[in-house]
Each structure stands twice: as C-alpha cells, then as structure tokens.
Amino acid sequence: MPSSFHGNSLGCLAVLESSRRTQQGARSFGVSASSSLSVAASAVNGASTTSSASSSEEDGGQLFRLNVSEKARTVTSVCTSGTLCTVSGYDGIEGAPFGSYVDYVLDDDGNPVLLMNDMSMHTINIREKSLANTNGGTTGPSMVSLFTQLGGAGAGDRQDVSRCSITGTIEKIDPDTAEDMGMIRMRYSITHAYADQVMDSPRFDFYRIIPNKVYFVGGFGVLAKWVPVEEYMTAGPDILAKEASTIVSRINRDHGDDLLLTAKELLQVDEVEGIRVTNVDRLGMDIRVTKRAKRRNKLITDEFRVGFRIPVISVEDAKSEILKVFQEAWEKGNGVIWETDDELPGTNVPIFKIAEDGLE
C-alpha cells in the first residue's frame, strides 16, 4: 500500500477518508498546514487574464498542463535572483557579454526591477552602452538579458529545473515620476533584507527591464519555447510555485515504491530503471521514467503528465490528489474493485506522454 496510508485508508473515495488523507499527506510531504496558499489563490492565479491551461484538439493533455506563459511567469515570480548579462565596455573585452549575479523583484506586469550600485561593473556597462547609443545616433537604452532558474532538489537535478531568460531594454527608474515606486520599494524591502540599508543611498538606483523577448526552458530534453511578451505579462504564477520543489523532493525521497507501482499499473511501463517526479503544479505532476529498451544496454527515458481531476487551490489539495493517484495504482495492482464504482481503479486518471525517448 502507499506508504502514507494506514488502516482503513482503502475507503479513499469516501469524503471523510479523503479529508483524513489530506491531513495525513501534509505530514507525509513535510509541508505544514500553515504553508497552505488557498487564501492567496484568487490573488495569484485569479490575477491572470490568460487561460489557466490552453486546450488543443491535437493534444488533450494541454487541458492538464500550465501554458508556457504561466510556466515562464512562475519561474520569474518564484526566483528572486539571477544572472544579468550586459555588453562589456572594458578595455580588451569590448562588446563581449558580461554576466553578473543580481537580485530582483517583479512589478505588476512581470518586469524585473533591480536595485544596483552605480559602481558595479554591470551598471557601468549599461550606462556606457546607453551613452554609446546616444552618441552613435541610435535611439533607446541599453539592451540586457536576465537569466533565472528554479532551485533543484540537488546539484544533480540542475538540468531538470525550469528556467527563463528575459531580454529587453533596461532603464533607470525616476523615483519622482514612477507611479509604482512605493510598491517597488516595499517588495524589495520584503524580498531582500539588505535593501532598507542601501535603497536610499545616492549610489543606488532602481532599474527596470522591459522585455522584448522571453524564452522558457522546461528542463533537459522537455520543452524550449519563445513566449509572447504580451502573454507573459498577463499570465499569473502557479499557486504551488513556492512549495513545488519541497513536494517534489519529498515524493522522490519517500515514495519510491508508490512511484514504481504507478509506473507499472497506470503508466503501463515495465522494466523500470529509474522514476522520479520532476514537477508539480495546480493541474498535475510530471513523471520521468527510464526503462530498458529491447536492445540490450540501451535505456529510454519518457516523460508523462499525470493530471489532477480538478485544479487544486492549496498545497494540501495537491498532496491529497497525489496520494489518490498512488492509492489507485495500489488498488489496481492488488485487484481491488469497489461495488459502488462504475469504473476500475485508475481508469479515469488523466495520463499523457509529453516527451518520448527524447533523452536516450
């Protein structure tokens, strides 16, 4: 049985049992009930004017997946730091890309806002490039790129995490004319503890990146796509974004047997060499399965999307839905049939293969 289930948990279809399993799942995944984001559901996801999941006649699985705009906005919203790439003006490396570690927050449109020292090399590059544009007869401020990626469960998982690059123009914010200056200061103060000590210094200024292009990568061998800027700006981050990494880590660490049973009974994959969850969001979870091919010494890796029957609005809801999937895999594997059910266990779990043999 799934490791989080005990005693009479086979009655998972009953309302009381489902409620009990939700509370038990909170302990199993190691996230306290106080971390629930249900109160903020409408504030975060409701702010999006983009459809929560795009539908497609060619791929019904899109109904159970975040669209790429939401994925990109989730990455930039969860992350608070990244690599800023400017054009160097330093002697000997003029015109070369120069990367710097920077902190940032987002404004209401998803534009990154940075608090930068006027003596930092990236600030000097931006200032000199802007001057060169002006003296050279071209119009517009300096062009930069900001790269950021979600934190993985470990060093070996870095290629699996989602990342996003925003390329656009960067301009110094005039505190006297910017209508959202108060909001920016507040967000920066809350997000970065040092901000209160330097934001009023004459050597520090806020800069805003206005995206021209947004590029999203879902992970190694999974998805890479340019995101329309307008769609990125109106998209909302996923409600589970801040807890997803913790949930994924706990599933892979504590529910290996449940995942193997899910692969065999629901994903219909035999001879599994490796399996792990790579992502969880409000619409479902991604599972990566490595199996042995017919040819000896060859491994094939596939990515599956296991959708939730209903979109979740809290961390506890997500854990409950995941445990239901594990429970149905166990029921199917053990031949459990409920007289009150019209369908066999696992038959109505939304499952789609989203990447096939792309990582061999």
Image: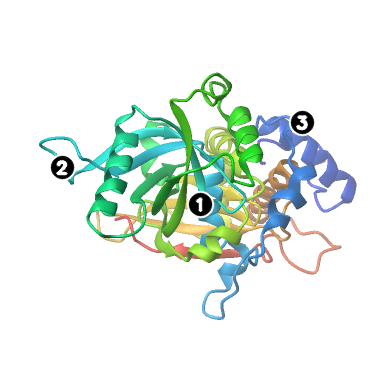
The answer to which quarter of the image holds residue 195 is top right
Q: Which residue does the numbered mark 1 point to in the structure image?
A: 287
Vertical placement of residue 212 versus 318, above or below: below
Q: Which residue does the numbered mark 3 point to in the structure image?
A: 34
Does the image show residue 266?
Answer: no
Report x, y in % for residue 358: 34, 60
Does the image show residue 39?
Answer: yes
Report x, y in % for residue 161: 44, 45
Which kind of residue does numbered mark 3 sit on?
Ser
Considering the numbered disc 3 on the image, is that residue within a helix, a strand or a loop?
helix
| Quadrant into which the C terminus falls | bottom left
Residue farthest to the right, as pictured: 16
The answer to which quarter of the image holds residue 284 is bottom right
Mark 3 → mark 1, Cα distance in angstroms: 27 Å
Q: 195 or 223: nearer the eye? A: 195
Q: Do tag 2 and tag 3 residues touch (Cβ < 8 Å)?
A: no
- Classify mark 1: residues with Cα within 10 Å, few (<14), some (14-19) or many (20+): many
Mark 1 → mark 2, Cα distance in angstroms: 45 Å
In this rendering, which labeled residue sits more in front, label 3 or label 1?
3
Which residue is painted at 80% across and 69% down in the image? 342
Return the disc, 2 or 3, that comes first in the chain's sequence: 3
Q: Which residue does the numbered mark 2 point to in the structure image?
A: 94
Report x, y in % for residue 304: 50, 59
Mark 2 → mark 3, Cα distance in angstroms: 51 Å
Q: Do tag 3 and tag 1 residues touch (Cβ < 8 Å)?
A: no
Q: Is residue 167 left or right of residue 342?
A: left
Which kind of residue does numbered mark 1 sit on?
Ile
- Classify mark 3: residues with Cα within 10 Å, few (<14), some (14-19) or many (20+): few
| Quadrant into which the N terminus falls | top right
